[in-house]
Amino acid sequence: MDIAILESYISRFYGYGSWNAPLWFIGMEEGGCPTLDEFSSRLICWSRRGSAELEDAPAYHKELNFTRWFGPKAKLQSTWEKLVRIYLSSQGLLSDIEAVRHFQGERFGSRDCGFASLELFPLPSTDTSAWIYRDAAHIPYLINRQVYKYYVYPKRAEGLRQRIATHRPKYVIIYGLAYVDEWEGIIGKKFGGRDSHNVHETTFESSRILVVPHPVARGLAQSYWQEIGKRLNEGHHELPEPMPNMLTPPPATPQTPSP
């Protein structure tokens, strides 16, 4: 694995979409990638495509030949589907399961999808206890997850803070209540208490910041994510106009049960 490309990825890659989008989502790290070989393929593809800070998710995953989450028969991704539900609800659009599937399959993380999907930490992982990067290019700070986070966090938090200050998104929705300390480090101040919807809310520069539960948190109905989206409706006119193919998802195709 090329050390220079890997370190560039760690310092530069933040996720999918566009910095100019008025709505940003920020999570802890991208899921998936169970093997170092799979990550190496991602890394090579990212470098070949220009080493961008933000990728176009559908195009990037198509080039990787990983299309499970995209296309007309996309499988719902457990985190992405909640983010899509928030976005569609913020637009006053239908956000039932087929509308969400259609948007995710066609537009999630594209340059013009209307939001950016970002990660604090750049290296994907199947869960917080897994660590496949110990022998990746023999970089000392990748010896384990704890050392990696200690080394990478200050630079990444500062990077996100600078980009919020520069691009001034209208809304930043950060998810994962277990990581409030890390989120406070991004904006450089303490959050107040949580409201009746279990949400921290504050401002940074001209951006409205909401910290919400993680999308895979148990016990939250789909209506919860719709309500988060509706909280953004007061600035609905400032969000981008919905694309035509967002308005009318195709009819559901009957699925043949798996054997």
Image (spheres, grey):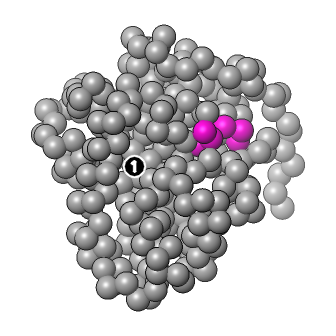
Residue drawn at x 24%, y 47% as measured from the top left: 186
Where disc 1 sits, the SS reads strand
Q: Which of 199 and 181 is in front in this view?
A: 181
In the rendered image, residue 109 lying in the magenta stretch gets the answer: yes
The magenta stretch is 105-111
Looking at the image, is 21 positioned above or below residue 52?
above
Answer with left or right where residue 251 lies relative to residue 208.
Answer: right
Q: Name the residue under label 1.
A: 27
Residue drawn at x 40%, y 19% as measured from the top left: 232
Answer with left or right where residue 193 lies relative to residue 132.
Answer: left
Q: Nearer the viewer, residue 166 or 186?
A: 166
Quadrant where the C terminus lies? bottom right
User: In this orientation, does residue 101 appear?
Assistant: no
Quadrant where the N terminus lies? bottom right
Answer with left or right where residue 210 lies relative to residue 55.
Answer: left
Q: Position of residue 191 (x, y in %)?
A: 16, 36
Q: Where is residue 123 in the image (x, y as percent from the top left)?
A: 44, 66
The amino acid type found where label 1 is placed reads Gly
Q: Where is residue 15 in the image (x, y as percent from the top left)?
A: 49, 51
Answer with left or right where residue 11 lies relative to residue 124.
Answer: left
Looking at the image, is 65 positioned above or below residue 115?
below
In the rendered image, residue 219 lying in the magenta stretch gets the answer: no
